[in-house]
Image: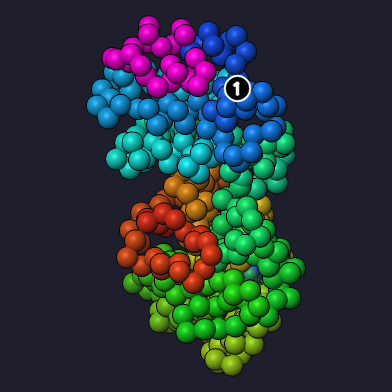
Amino acid sequence: MSELHHILTFPIRPITKEAYLPKLSAFLKSGIPATYTLEQVAAFEQGKEDDETTSGSNTTPLHILARSLPEDLSSDETVVVLEMMNTLFEYGAGWNFLDYENKSIGDLLLEKRGQDRNGILYQRVVEAGVSAELLLRKVTGGEIEFLDDDDNDDELPIIKEDPPKDDEQESYSHSEGATKIAVDNDATAADQETYLHTKLEYTDDALVTKDNRDGVMMDWETNIMKLASDTIFPDLNDTSSATVLNIGFGMGIIDSFIQEKNPKRHYICEAHPDVLAKMKKDGWYEKQNVVILEGRWQDTLNKLLDDGNVFFDGIYYDTFSEHYQDMLDLYDLIVGLIKPEGVFSFFNGLGADRPICYDVYKKIVELDVAIYSMKCEYTTIHIDKQLPDWKDVKRSYFNCNYYYHPRISFI
Ligand SMILES: C[S@@+](CC[C@H](N)C(=O)[O-])C[C@H]1O[C@@H](n2cnc3c(N)ncnc32)[C@H](O)[C@@H]1O
């Protein structure tokens, strides 16, 4: 352990400015990187080069700080720790490295601070994540990446949402990235073109890809779909005059809830031929208030916007194998298609692989829609009882036991 690492274990109590900040600043000013990892120290001690570290983890100074936080940290001490974090971030500390236990700084702070997501230390990491993500978005195309050793050759810290690092890790991966968006090694999930040419199969409780059993939709989300269908009707007392749009039919769970409200017009946009075939078989084409837009929303909604005849009271978005950049593109269409008092919502699996990432994206969406003078209000619902045990899938895609349900409307 280096001297920099040592002072972050808080050897002196109480934690005061005088005891810690000058020393910390001096180490960083002297050129020790704020990202100097325990693994690099170990490699150095063994006479290896930095890039010869083989552990695949990055235990950074901020990890050591988070791991070493005393349980009886006073509020004065918390302020000093916050200043230490600020200093480390100023000197380029990353918020998204994973340590020797595959934990991010956010994971460790939540563990240490009783899962308090509103605590100032955790929120400081969220803030750092939001800044980094917004700064790097243009460079990285909106991908999120958690950094471990495999990614060290990237010049800039990117955040990717917990991609599996070996080919074995097939995933039920429909909700990484933005909504049901894939950012992993699986081509079906990561690439729309591949997905749209992949055969699908409906099982009792899911819609999966036929060959490798990737989940496109699972019925554990039924309660979320119920809440979402209520949300996109701005006036629940008069749903029969509403015109709503659902993007992504999947198992049709939300569409069935929407139908129960008997709206004036219920548009459904769906791109996959197997899903469209199922919709035909189940009679969705015959429903008198249903209009089906066949094809990708990227193609069909532009036409609707150009025609200028339809404006929606509510729009819901829940697709598969798209990226956050797609959502950014969608916002442009939403503002043109939604009525001034209309509501937009989406399946929020953004970063739900990890609480810190989920919180970073929660803020990013707020900031992105604010550009359109829209506000995103979240309802937090507890979903631990609804979550599946994931035993049939190699990787769970939703690792938070709460769900941030978004309701987006004009300010
Ligand atoms: C997760 S499912 C939707 C589940 C749905 N919310 C429900 O309640 O069952 C995603 C659906 O989006 C469709 N989809 C994927 N990309 C699309 C796109 N670009 N345009 C339209 N539909 C798309 C998929 O084929 C799939 O049917």
Instruction: Judge by depth and name the residue closer to the eye, 79 or 294.
Output: 79
Q: Position of residue 54 (x, y in %)?
A: 64, 38
Instruction: Judge by depth and name the residue closer to the eye, 333 or 134.
Output: 134
- Say above or below: 307 vs 101: below
- Say above or below: 387 vs 146: below
| Element at label 1 | helix
Q: Position of residue 259 (x, y in %)?
A: 45, 81
Q: Position of residue 342 (x, y in %)?
A: 49, 61
Q: Position of residue 361 (x, y in %)?
A: 52, 46
Q: Is residue 193 magenta?
A: no
Q: Which residues are magenta?
A: 1-23
One can see residue 292 in this view: yes
Q: Which residue is pictured at 65% across the width and 83% down the height?
A: 274
Q: Which residue is pictured at 56% across the width and 50% down the height?
A: 162
Instruction: Judge by depth and name the residue closer to the eye, 199 or 196.
Output: 199
What is the three-letter code of the residue carrying label 1?
A: Glu
Q: Quadrant of ligand 1?
A: bottom right
- Say above or below: 348 vs 66: below
Q: Is residue 109 left or right of residue 47?
A: left
Which residue does the numbered mark 1 point to in the structure image?
A: 45
Q: Is residue 350 left or right of residue 325?
A: left
Looking at the rendering, which quadrant does residue 379 occupy? bottom left
Instruction: Judge by depth and name the residue closer to the eye, 262 or 246.
Output: 246
